[in-house]
Amino acid sequence: MFARGETQHIRLQSATDAALAHLELDGLLAELLQRIRAILDVDTCTILLLDEQTDELVARAAIGIEEEVARGVRIPVGRGFAGRVAGERRPIFLPDVDHADVLNPLLREKGVKSLLGVPLLVEGQPIGVLHVGSLGAREFTQEEMDLLQLVAVRAALAIEHAKLFEVERTARGRL
């Protein structure tokens, strides 16, 4: 039998493997968020992708705070929670959103208390941020942080692959 940590790691590994089989970006993001939310038992899960022209993170997919995508939330790299995660290229944990530098008002409106964010990196460069949140105060363990970072590594590559697939499909459609 597996220890709790090993079981969680195996579940997360299988979740990313299954989610990364999608070629279309929207399907990939939706599947990935659902699985992360269930495995880490969080209330919110969001992916913001980098708009290289404006150097802003744009909410692309969300569960638990879907309005973030509908409102087209944009966060400058280096500012606020998600901007810091991308700018510093490292995981960041906020135990108390109420007393932190968070630019997105939706997080407070929805009652998110704790956040954990990890950068989505390709060849060391940020392409976005993946963050999860809890409506109650929560301490994320180092293991949970490591697991989310593992997902981010795999997700970043899958996102880049899906973007290339979309460009190719669009080009074929024009021909």
Image (cartoon, rainbow, N blue to C red):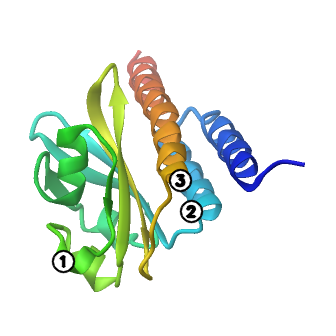
Residue 106 lies in what quarter of the image? bottom left
> Looking at the image, is 31 positioned above or below residue 16?
below
Residue nearest the viewer, comparing 133 with 139: 139
Front label number (1 vs 2): 1
Q: Quadrant of the C terminus?
A: top left
Tell me the residue at 26%/74% (across/down).
Answer: 97
Tell me the residue at 47%/50% (across/down).
Answer: 145
Q: What residue type is disc 1 on?
A: His
> Looking at the image, is 17 positioned above or below residue 83?
above
| Mark closest to the chain's N terminus, 1 or 2 | 2
Q: CA distance from mark 1 to mark 3?
A: 23 Å
Residue nearest the viewer, comparing 171 with 67: 67
Q: How many marks?
A: 3
Tell me the residue at 50%/73% (across/down).
Answer: 43
Q: Position of residue 122 (x, y in %)?
A: 35, 25
Q: What residue type is disc 3 on?
A: Glu
Residue underneath mark 3: 144
Q: Is residue 102 left or right of residue 117?
A: left
> Looking at the image, is 84 positioned above or below residue 64?
above
Front label number (2 vs 3): 3
Q: Is residue 112 left or right of residue 52?
A: right
- Tag 1 and tag 3, C-beta contact below 8 Å: no
Q: What residue type is disc 2 on?
A: Arg
Task: Using a 10 Å C-alpha cutoff, classify the residue at mark 3 as few (fewer than 14 neighbours), some (14 to 19) or many (20 or more).
Answer: some
Q: Is residue 142 left or right of residue 107?
A: right
Q: Position of residue 62 (x, y in %)?
A: 42, 62
Q: State the SS at label 2.
A: helix
Q: Which mark is residue 37?
A: 2
Q: Which mark is residue 99?
A: 1
Q: Position of residue 139 (x, y in %)?
A: 45, 68
